[in-house]
Amino acid sequence: MIDDLILTLDDLSVQEKTVLLRVDINSPVDESKKIKNETRIRRSLKTIEELKAKKARLVILAHQADPIEYQNFTVLREHGELLSALLGTKVEYIEDVAGPFAVEKVRGMKPGEILLLDNVRIHTEETIIFEEEVKLPPEEQVKTIIVQRLAPLADYYVCDAFAAVHRSQPTLVGFPEVLPSAAGRLFEEELKILTKVKQNPERPCIFILGGAKILDAFKMMRSVLDDRSADRILTTGLVAQVMLKAKGYRMGEATESYLEKKNLLEFVPAAEESLKNHSDRIVCPEDFAVDRSGERIEVAAGELPDDAPIADIGKKTISRYCNLIDDSKTVFINGPAGIYENSRFALGTRRIWERAASSGAFSVLGGGDSIAAAGLFEVQNRISFISTAGGGLIRFLSGEKLAVVEALKKSARKYSP
């Protein structure tokens, strides 16, 4: 068990039993809906391999879709093909989730066989719109079609979808209501490591927060400063721009217009509050690189031009941040420092990622853009731990209760051996 609260695979006798395994292999796709990055698929292999080795009848449930529902929505045929290739064994894929064909297939499975059902978000009850509008509690989600049809066919439920840990949907919180349920190996590893970062990191511990999703960053910042998980916050990206605006800096017309257009100025009061309570622990850039007709121009934070928007942190800031990384024992990174996809403005992100990877600190990195940058700069194998989660990671470090964690805890209390 994890902290005597959640069951793991060690607590289940899955030999020749039917196991419903919920994974998160939601992957970025190109314009033709072909998978561009296999990270989450590869991270799911450990649990699948262990369950197959124990000759479980393994039924895999997964989704493929962004929160905007049909952006990146596609069937899971290619996911099944990649799983088969990576595992070196057959993963049968069917174009059904909980219909008569799927039920018949599950009933006819033999020990050691693996079946991948189609994208669960084909079902309305598995969409985020349904989750946010209908708001069924877990005990009511037992009555949904997916749970009603699949749960009676299974002996156990295993969740390895840590990236969806904050979602309250039937395949995530409904099955634990009616089946003995456990965390998969990836879920177990993510929970243990992020709990350590949150509750007992080696110190000094710094958080480097940047990127464009500043709602997430400000949620996390307040929590980790108040509970002293972080000794310092180093700000980059749009987070840094809002913090400097809160400090009274003139950001230049081009940057100010962008912040206003994206409704980011509404975060200035939260930034002011954080600075008021923790000004000695929040570090802001002293210089930036701006984009002047595609050319990288370095300017001091107090001298930002009107005609060129911020595109990266400057070299003085990069040097200072790298020194602070060297002096730390734990480094958590979420969000790039600038427009890392453009080589002219990738310097801040690349240098910070490389320094975190080469330092002696325990480095943890999370978020889609952060992971993509790690791949671009070829440091993913030198970062101590890369979390598969995005929104779930933010909410966990922000101290929120997570729907799937609570569901697995409840199942452990009900079904613990």
Image: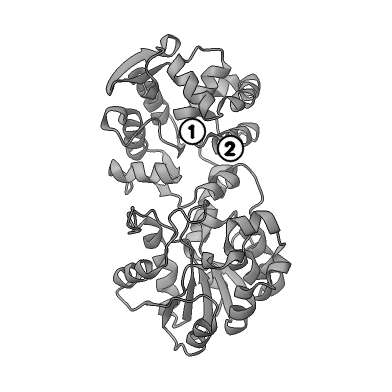
Quadrant that contains the C terminus: bottom right
- Residue placed at 51% from the left, 75% from the top? 97
Q: x and y percent of residue 315 in the render?
A: 33, 20
Residues under numbered marks 1 and 2 in contact, where contact means CB atoms less than 8 Å apart: yes
Neighbour tally class for label 2: few under 14, some 14-19, many 20 plus, Cα within 10 Å: many
Nearer to me, 116 or 1: 116
Nearer to me, 11 or 222: 222
Q: Is residue 149 above or below residue 195?
A: below
Asked if one can make out residue 298 in the rendered structure from this viewpoint, the answer is: yes
Answer left or right for 179 relative to 87: right
Nearer to me, 301 or 199: 301
Answer left or right for 270 relative to 318: right
Amino acid type, mark 1: Leu
Q: x and y percent of residue 106 in the render?
A: 50, 84
- Residue placed at 62% from the left, 25% from the top? 274
- Considering the numbered disc 1 on the image, is that residue within a helix, a strand or a loop? strand
Q: Is residue 100 above or below residue 47?
A: below
Residue marked by disc 1: 209
- Residue placed at 56% from the left, 24% from the top? 281
Amino acid type, mark 2: Met
- Residue placed at 32% from the left, 49% from the top? 381
Q: Quadrant of residue 305?
A: top left
Residue marked by disc 2: 220
Answer left or right for 403 relative to 241: right
Asked if one can make out residue 332 in the rendered structure from this viewpoint, the answer is: no
Q: x and y percent of residue 1 in the render?
A: 59, 65
Q: Quadrant of residue 272?
A: top right
Q: Is residue 326 above or below residue 287?
A: below
- Considering the numbered disc 2 on the image, is that residue within a helix, a strand or a loop? helix
Q: Is residue 184 above or below residue 402?
A: below
